[in-house]
Image: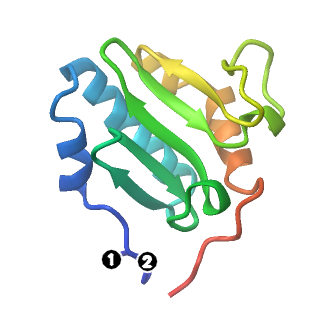
Amino acid sequence: MADGIVTSSDTEFRAMLAESPEPVARLALLARGLVFDVLPQTVEVVWPRQGVAGYGTGPKKMTEQFVWLAPHSKHLVFGFYYGAELPAPEGLLEGMGRLMRHVKIRAAADLANPELRQLVARATVHRVPPPRTA
């Protein structure tokens, strides 16, 4: 428990990554760190069967969460629940859905992109309530 908010444990997150190739698992850990660096009070929810972890100001996917991480065989999907509504540099976000967009992370340098960090920061305040306090 952090700040009175129940979050997934590091063990749950690492268990989700158990079947992922080591380079993708490493990227997922770095991406997770980026999310918590941008918003330290982030609530993390791991859905083991889906192989996805969601991040937000609460546990509800579309009303309290702003991003998700999904490891794949050759890359990590860094998804934005409302990516279609966020101001993003041309070519950064992929996807054709009504709301959701994502960035495919293939290397640690992708996570060092300041535009990605800015997008995560914007997402933390777009359509999600403020972080809960203890």
Q: Label 2: how many residues lie within 10 Å, few (<14), some (14-19) or many (20+)?
A: some
**Side of 86 where 7 appears, left or right:** left
Task: Report helix, strand or loop for mark 2.
Answer: loop
Residue 28 place in picture, x, y as percent:
35, 33
Q: Amino acid at mark 1?
A: Met
Report the colour scheme: rainbow
Q: Quadrant of the N terminus?
A: bottom left
**Side of 126 where 52 appears, left or right:** left
Residue 74 place in picture, x, y as percent:
34, 11
**CB under 8 Å between discs 1 and 2:** yes
Q: Label 1: how many residues lie within 10 Å, few (<14), some (14-19) or many (20+)?
A: few
**Side of 85 where 78 appears, left or right:** left
Name the residue beneath numbered marker 1: 1
Residue at 32% over, 61% down: 8
Residue at 42% over, 14% down: 106
> Vertical placement of 32 versus 116: above or below?
below
Name the residue beneath numbered marker 2: 5
Q: Amino acid at mark 2?
A: Ile
Residue 23 place in picture, x, y as percent:
25, 19
Residue at 62% over, 36% down: 117
Residue 59 place in picture, x, y as percent:
50, 65
* Residue 64 image-quadrant placement: bottom right
Residue at 30% over, 15% down: 73
Task: Report helix, strand or loop for mark 1.
Answer: loop
Of residues 114 and 107, the one nearer the viewer is 107
> Vertical placement of 21 versus 14: above or below?
above
Q: Which mark is residue 47?
A: none
CA–CA distance in space, label 1 to label 2: 6 Å
Q: Residue furthest bottom?
A: 134
